């Protein structure tokens, strides 16, 4: 009972009250100091000398400069938390700018950002180089043809099979053409044989897992004296290399193999067949009548002439 009275004595209660006042004053001063520093940082973040005043674009040859600037300005417009301008050179949204440019302009391969002359946002770009074209899920007319429409709706591809921009019409064999489904993880199953605005393939890959193997096999065909002009991967997983010699209404001869083939082994079988009679002579004398060479069945090579 006496102990309880001591704990509740007027002197002790007064001491506790004083401690609370001191703690409250300290908290108030710290809070005021924090608010003052915060207000100072907000103020400094708005200084013209610390904010982007110009955007400089270099390296682009095809992608429109004004379109790039408009996209960048969208990303640096507004403020963080409604207080800090996104144009501030210390914390402008670099990653957001890169992602927005890559998503909108698939032709851009490398994007580098830096602050130049204190207030200029310098954007250095590298555009993808067109090596091939993707022209839909399946060839519908001869490959190649002159004056026709086989190139309508084609898209450019780079050396890695990345599809990045719509291609203009080319007559003849300007670019090696690819046909067939793209990687499902990129754009899903495209139902039409020609790309449309609803099935734009830009930003996706063509057969990403074995694209380089396909290119190597294509180069091997050239060393065998063949002239491949297109590659078609069917819904069933067959690979068809289409050779030169097609017309406006027919495809050229086809080299057929399975998508899961051992490309090195298949190439060796084809080379052996082309240097062995009777195919060696028939191929030389009756090439225009060749319909296909089928390499889907192990070491056996089947072929057909009209």
Image (tube, grey):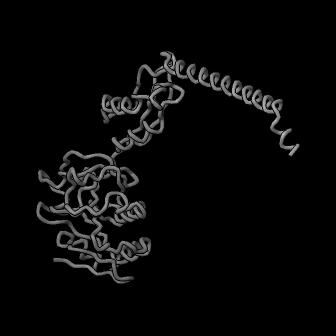
Q: Nearer the viewer, residue 168 or 107?
A: 107
Q: Residue at x 36, y 32 (%)?
A: 74
**Residue 300's spot in the image, x, y percent?**
35, 83
Quadrant of the image occupied by residue 236: bottom left
Judged left or right of residue 282, residue 86 is right
Q: Residue 103, how many percent across, how many down?
A: 36, 44
**Vertical order, 243 against 3 (above or below):** below
- Locate residue 196 relative to residue 249 in the image: left or right: right
Question: Is 113 located above or below residue 260 in the figure?
Answer: above
For residue 68, side relative to residue 17 (left or right): left
Choose between 223 and 7: the one closer to the eye: 7
Image-quadrant location for residue 178:
bottom left
Q: Nearer the viewer, residue 188 or 173?
A: 188
Q: Residue 275 or 75: which is nearer the viewer?
A: 75
Q: Residue furthest top?
A: 48
Could you tell me which residue is drawn at 35 percent across and 65 percent down?
Answer: 221
Query: Which quadrant of the structure image shows residue 235?
Result: bottom left
Where does the C terminus fall, quadrant-wise? bottom left
Measured along the vertical axis of the image, is residue 290 above or below residue 116?
A: below
Q: Position of residue 164 (x, y in %)?
A: 33, 47
Task: Decide: is 23 above or below 227.
Answer: above
Residue at image location 41% in from the left, 64% down from the top: 210
């Amino acid at each position: 009972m006496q102990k309880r009275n001591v704990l509740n004595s007027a002197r002790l209660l007064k001491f506790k009250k004083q401690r609370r006042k001191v703690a409250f004053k300290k908290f108030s001063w710290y809070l005021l100091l924090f608010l003052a520093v915060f207000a100072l940082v907000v103020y400094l973040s708005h200084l013209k000398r610390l904010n982007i005043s110009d955007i400089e674009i270099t390296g682009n040859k095809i992608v429109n400069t004004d379109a790039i600037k408009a996209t960048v300005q969208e990303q640096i417009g507004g403020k963080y938390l409604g207080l800090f301008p996104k144009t501030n050179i210390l914390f402008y949204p670099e990653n957001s700018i890169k992602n927005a440019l890559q998503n909108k302009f698939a032709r851009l391969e490398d994007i580098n950002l830096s602050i130049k002359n204190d207030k200029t946002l310098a954007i250095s770009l590298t555009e993808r180089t067109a090596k091939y074209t993707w022209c839909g899920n399946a060839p519908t007319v001869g490959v190649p043809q002159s004056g026709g429409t086989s190139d309508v709706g084609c898209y450019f591809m780079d050396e890695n099979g990345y599809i990045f921009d719509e291609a203009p019409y080319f007559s003849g064999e300007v670019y090696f053409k690819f046909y067939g489904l793209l990687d499902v993880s990129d754009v899903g199953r495209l139902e039409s044989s020609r790309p449309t605005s609803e099935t734009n393939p830009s930003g996706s890959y063509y057969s990403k897992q074995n694209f380089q193997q396909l290119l190597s096999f294509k180069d091997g065909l050239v060393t065998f004296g063949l002239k491949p002009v297109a590659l078609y991967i069917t819904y069933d997983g067959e690979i068809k290399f289409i050779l030169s010699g097609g017309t406006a209404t027919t495809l050229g001869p086809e080299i057929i193999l399975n998508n899961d083939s051992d490309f090195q082994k298949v190439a060796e079988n084809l080379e052996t067949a082309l240097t062995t009679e009777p195919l060696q002579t028939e191929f030389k004398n009756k090439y225009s009548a060749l319909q296909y060479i089928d390499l889907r069945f192990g070491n056996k090579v089947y072929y057909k002439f009209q």
